[in-house]
């Protein structure tokens, strides 16, 4: 896949002395959804700010479609739409005016048919004559996306698009983002909701204290680091794991009522049937059985805590 944004050795130290980014290297590929995942203060908004030309980098280079974001700012910026973390917009303007104005900021000729299609897609067409202040919170968020798309960018940045929104609206947003991707837009979103990265992303970048500690295809990340667990609810509680079951990696939970077998995701079904057979030979009966696999959340917590 061709790279649309190429970031090398990017660092940012704010005037306050805070080092928000430390030598970040990252390639963003055409047509992907990349989720930048990291706790508050990790440097996500700073990274987006630099790529969008709002924050000046201390060192390093960012190329957007081959254009340097500092030297060829206008060309680089024209490729990018940004939905900022903070919703700031003029409350008295109408939906229609504000979106057309956003397009004009990029020096493009008006294109009412295009703006109509954006508003239709975001279910804002019926609201086009309303003032922004009359819109619900969810509608305002859609409007921010419409403004970001007004100049037909190839790349869309969404900085914490669903922070503080309810579950229904979050699912709506996810659906919209997927639709945009299907139409060919490259999407980079930041989030501290692991569930969001898990649901949406093709690739996940984990930022911690200004460092990109990992960038990986989501599926292979979960395969590599994920664990599966089989949980057996025992008829009779156990005080300890019998010697005869020592060859499996077992532990007890629920005051001896639950026998847990944990194994790597890529060893699918490894040893389960032999474990169950051995248990039946030993007359260890269970009344219920469940399997679960570790979520990205568990993987993420391990990653962020593991690399001190
Ligand atoms: N304008 C600024 N001036 C000084 N420090 C800042 C500024 N913006 C962000 N920071 C600091 O840089 C670090 C990264 O912040 P930010 O990029 O907003 O992280 P995130 O978006 O991951 O929460 C934090 O320590 C934050 O306090
Ligand atoms: Mg932020």
Image (spheres, grey):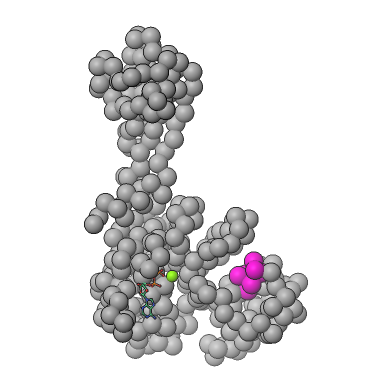
Position of the C terminus, as image quadrant, is: bottom left
> Can you give x and y, in whole percent of width and height, for residue 45 in the image?
41, 72
Q: Is 113 or 141 nearer to us in this picture?
A: 141
Q: Majority secondary structure of the magenta segment?
A: helix
The location of residue 59, given as percent across then percent down, is 26, 81
The image quarter in which residue 33 lies: bottom left
In the figure, residue 77 lies in which quadrant?
bottom left
Q: Is residue 149 visible?
A: no
Give the residue drawn at x 40%, y 25%. 255
Q: Is residue 226 above or below residue 235?
A: below
Question: In which quadrant of the rendered image does the N terminus lie?
Answer: bottom left
Residue 299: x, y in percent? 36, 48
Q: Is residue 96 left or right of residue 79?
A: right
Q: Residue at x 49, y 22 (%)?
A: 288
Q: Above or below — where is 126 with respect to 32?
A: below
Examine the rendering and report whether any part of residue 72 can be seen: yes
Residue 134: within the magenta? no
Residue pictured at 30% horizontal, 76% vertical: 18
Judge by depth and name the residue closer to the eye, 49 or 3.
Answer: 49
Q: Is residue 268 above or below residue 226?
A: above
The quarter of the rendering in which ligand 1 is drawn is bottom left
Residues shaded magenta: 137-143
Check residue 139 for magenta coloring.
yes
Which residue does the image show at 42% across and 45% down from the upper left? Answer: 295
Image location of residue 80, percent across then percent down: 47, 77
Image quadrant of residue 242?
top left
Query: Relative to residue 154, is residue 122 drawn left or right?
Result: right
């Amino acid at each position: 896949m061709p790279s649309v944004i190429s970031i090398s050795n990017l660092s940012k130290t704010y005037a306050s002395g805070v080092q928000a980014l430390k030598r970040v290297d990252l390639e963003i590929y055409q047509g992907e959804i990349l989720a930048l995942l990291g706790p508050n203060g990790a440097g996500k908004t700073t990274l987006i700010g630099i790529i969008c030309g709002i924050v000046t980098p201390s060192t390093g280079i960012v190329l957007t479609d081959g254009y340097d974001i500092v030297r060829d700012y206008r060309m680089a910026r024209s490729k990018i739409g940004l939905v900022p973390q903070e919703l700031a917009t003029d409350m008295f303007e109408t939906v229609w005016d504000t979106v057309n104005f956003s397009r004009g900021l990029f020096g493009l000729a008006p294109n009412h048919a295009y703006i109509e299609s954006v508003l239709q897609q975001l279910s804002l067409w019926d609201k086009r004559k309303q003032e922004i202040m009359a819109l619900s919170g969810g509608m305002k968020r859609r409007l921010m996306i419409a403004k970001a798309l007004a100049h037909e960018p190839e790349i869309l940045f969404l900085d914490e698009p669903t922070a503080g929104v309810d579950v229904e609206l979050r699912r709506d947003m996810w659906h919209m983002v997927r639709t945009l991707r299907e139409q060919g837009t490259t999407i980079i979103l930041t989030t501290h909701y692991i569930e969001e990265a898990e649901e949406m992303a093709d690739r996940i970048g984990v930022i911690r204290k200004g460092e990109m500690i990992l960038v990986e295809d989501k599926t292979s990340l979960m395969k590599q680091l994920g664990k599966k667990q089989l949980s057996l609810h025992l008829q009779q509680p156990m005080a300890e794991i019998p010697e005869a079951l020592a060859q499996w990696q077992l532990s007890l939970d629920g005051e001896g009522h639950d026998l847990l077998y944990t194994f790597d995701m890529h060893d699918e079904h490894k040893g389960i049937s032999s474990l169950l057979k051995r248990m039946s030979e030993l007359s260890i009966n269970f009344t219920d059985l469940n399997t679960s696999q570790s979520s990205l959340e568990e993987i993420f917590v391990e990653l962020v805590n593991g690399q001190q």
